[in-house]
Amino acid sequence: MRVALVCPYSLSRPGGVQGQVLGLARALGSLGHEALVLAPADGPVEAEGLSPGQLMTLGRSLPVRANGSVAPISLDPVAAGRAVRRLRRDAVEVVHLHEPLAPGAGYGCLMVCPQPLIGTFHRSGASTGYRLLGPLARWAAGRLDVRCAVSPLAESTAAEALGGHYEIVGNGVELDRVAGREPWPTAGPTVLFVGRHERRKGLGVLLEAFGRLRSEESVPAATLWVVGDGPETDALRARTAADPRVVWLGRVDDDELAARRCGAHVVCAPSLGGESFGMVLLEAMAARAAVVASDIPGYAFVAGSHARLVAPGDVAGWSEALSRALAEAARGTGMSAPDALERAYEHAARWSMGRLAERYVGIYQEALARRSRVG
């Protein structure tokens, strides 16, 4: 089967949707299907496992504010037209649109592509775009043969604005790219944060909570690795300039991130909201790290009993949870006990990218069969 995966966000910028699209393309290839990825790009794209012929870049992106963050989206109608022509020329059988109503090539596909159209909705929270477009957005969504959502929260967001029925499919974790890496060396208990440095991700809360930790017999001196960048980087870094325990790493490549994830003892996800899914949690579990995360619906959906959940924004609660997690890491007990880490890994494995690809192949085949019956 030849499938096109259309992503509205720049592949040269780190992001959850971009990672899902590239990972799904690799997994579909492992199942014997051919995947073509179409998306904006602003520079080199890390797409290990995919050939250059499987990537079509759709111009450069522009920063667009959305959902408390900044989305790198292409607004080039010429690029959208080229995408549609490529899908026709390559005889693509199914077009899979991720975040199908985000500005970009998706709208061109929704308007004119004759192939079955699958849409996966990732976002959570109210959408100004859905509200402003109104009937046009509902019409565009009605062009989809199948609507999927990555979580009940994403389903609720889309259904409230657009109506319709949605299949909850989740996201996928690439176990071979996350687990089993040589751990990055550590000098003691180590905490890892990965994410964009903006208010919504809660890094300021984590830094304040970490700053309250004091070394004692039950809580050894710890290090905090901060990966990523964003609009708050300079201000937050200035706040911790006198604390040598906080190590600012900036953006790192996929290999280093995987190694640091495997080397960290605790991974923290302190988001204040706006998260429809908890990929950062699953990746940490797959790397056999203990997880402390905000108690928000998107994270609770994937955490099960394998993460310590804390009220978002509660600095005192975060400091207490970190202290307990680090003490357990030092002793190899609680959530850091070998059997607990193994159970968390098995939980993450149930969300593997391979399983997700198999689920989507079934959806593609059903959409093709339905079109065939109608035709």
Image: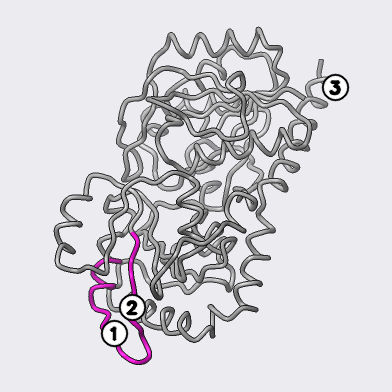
Extent of the magenta region: 206-225
Residue at 73% across, 22% down = 2
Q: Which residue is mark 2?
A: 317
Quadrant in which the N terminus is drawn: top right
Amino acid type for the residue under numbered disc 1 = Ser
Amino acid type for the residue under numbered disc 3 = Arg
Residue 115, placed above or below residue 239: above
Counting from the top left corner in percent of width and height, residue 207 is at 26, 66
Residue 329, placed above or below residue 200: below
Q: Secondary structure at mark 3?
A: helix
Mark 1 to mark 3: distance in Å? 68 Å
Q: Could you say which quadrant of the image residue 374 lies in? A: top right
Counting from the top left corner in percent of width and height, residue 347 is at 65, 65
Residue 65, placed above or below residue 154: above
Q: Are marks 1 and 3 in contact (CB under 8 Å)?
A: no
Q: Which residue is mark 3?
A: 373
Which of the marked residues, 2 or 1, is nearer the chain's N terminus?
1
Q: Secondary structure at mark 1?
A: loop
Amino acid type for the residue under numbered disc 2 = Gly
Taking the image as shown, residue 286 lies to the left or right of residue 236, namely: right
Q: Which residue is mark 1?
A: 215
Mark closer to the observer (1, 3): 1
Quadrant in which the C terminus is drawn: top right
Residue at 80% across, 26% down = 370
